[in-house]
Image (cartoon, rainbow, N blue to C red):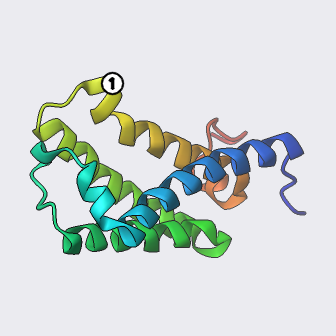
Amino acid sequence: MTDMIPTGQVIAGRVLSGLVILFLLFDAGLKLVSPETAIKYSPPNLGWPLEVGTMYLLAILLLVPTLLYIWPRTAILGAILITAYLGGAIATQVRVGNPLFSHSLFGVYLGLMLWGGLWLRDPRLRALIPLRAGAGA
C-alpha cells in the first residue's frame, strides 16, 4: 500500500520549497554571476573578507546543497547541508549583534520553510519525523 499524500499538502510543500529554492538560487547566482554586486551590497561589519573569491566560495557552498535539495532523491541531504549553511549565517548575524527578528532569525525562518516544504511533500520524512504518535505509541 502506498502512502497517499493529499493534493493540497503536496502543493503547499512544493510552494514552500519553491520559494526557498528561488531565494537560495538567486543568492548563490548573484554571488557567482556578479560577485562585485554582492560585495557592494554586503554589510562591511560581518567579518567576512569582501573579495570575489569569498563570494565564489559562499556561492558554491550554497549552490551545491540547493541543487541537491531540488532533486527528490537527495532532497533530505540537501536540506541538511542548507541547514548547516544557514546556521553559519545565523551565527554571523548574532556575532555582530544585528537585530534579532529581522536579521539573526532570518535563517531560522528560511530553515522552517525549507524543512516544512520538504516534510509536506516527502512521505519518507513524515515517516521519520511524525508530528503525532502512531497508534502503538
Question: Is 90 situated left or right of 3 in this image?
Answer: left
Q: Is residue 39 depicted above or below 97 in this figure?
A: below
Give me the residue at 55% from left, 42% from top.
113
Element type where label 1 sits in the image: helix
Q: Locate residue 92, reporting x and y percent.
A: 18, 46
In which quadrant will I find the N terminus? bottom right
On the rendered image, what quadrant is the C terminus found in? top right
- Residue type marked 1: Phe
Asked whether, in this view, residue 52 is left or right of residue 63, the answer is left
How many labels sit on residues?
Answer: 1
Q: Which residue is mark 1?
A: 101
Q: Residue at x 33, y 33 (%)?
A: 105
The residue positioned 64% from the left and 75% from the top of the image is: 73
Left or right placement of residue 43 versus residue 78 in this view = left
- Name the residue rendered at 38%, 71% in the picture: 32
Where residue 132 sits: x, y (%)?
64, 35
> On the image, which quarter does residue 116 sit in?
top right
The foreground one among 83 and 19 is 19
**17 and 124: which is toward the camera:** 17
Q: Residue 124: horizontal and vertical position, in percent?
A: 66, 61
Q: Residues within 10 Å of mark 1 (few under 14, many from 20)?
A: few
Please determine whether, in this image, residue 127 is positioned above or below residue 72: above
Against 94, residue 1 (above or below) is below
